[in-house]
Amino acid sequence: MIRVRIPLDLHAVASCGSPAFALATPLRIRDVLALAVREAIGARAPHDKFQRSIRRTLAGFVAGDFLIDVNGRHFTDCEAVVMCESTVDVRFFMR
């Protein structure tokens, strides 16, 4: 399990004026995967290593090598949107 901190989308809060976006942020699964990869390899990892890691992770996800679980919900599509609070738990499951 990788616990990922979700950044607050200040643009959505300011433009919509809705306090709901201050509590939860809508993110695509590919963005959650990118945050999980960054968390796993560390913030000080070189940018090219991050790019290679996320490219391979997304390719494996799209190919169906694994599925992910975000706070108890399974996802198989990288374009799906999930509402995230301040942190989410991401789990990877092999098929």
Image (tube, rainbow, N blue to C red):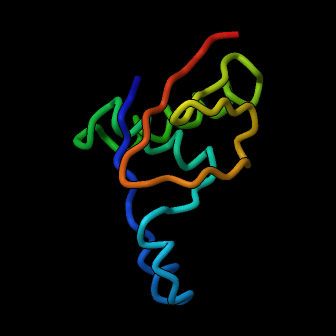
- Residue found 46% across the figure and 79% down from its top: 19
Task: Please report the residue visible at 62 percent of the width from the left and 33 percent of the height from the top.
Answer: 73
On the rendered structure, is 85 left or right of 79? left
Above/below status of 42 relative to 13: above
Q: Nearer the viewer, residue 70 or 37?
A: 70
Q: Quadrant of residue 46?
A: top left
Quadrant for the C terminus in the image: top right
- Judge from the rendering whether residue 28 lies leftward or rightward of residue 52; answer left or right: right
Percent across and percent down for residue 68 are 60, 27
Report the front residue among 28 and 49.
Answer: 28
Quarter of the image for residue 64 reads: top right
The answer to whether residue 77 is left or right of residue 89 is right
Give coordinates of residue 42: x percent, y percent. Answer: 27, 35
Relative image position of residue 87 (x, y in whole percent): 37, 46
- Can you say which quadrant of the picture contains the N terminus? top left
Q: Residue at 38% across / 29% down in the picture?
A: 2
Residue at x 46%, y 88% (from the top left corner): 14
Which residue extends farthest left?
A: 44
- 41 sits to left or right of 57: left
Where, by quadrant of the figure, is residue 75 drawn?
Answer: top right
Position of residue 51 measured from the top left corner of the image (x, y, whole percent): 48, 41
Above-or-below relation of 15 to 26: below
Count numbered badges in the picture: 0
Residue 34 to residue 12: above or below: above
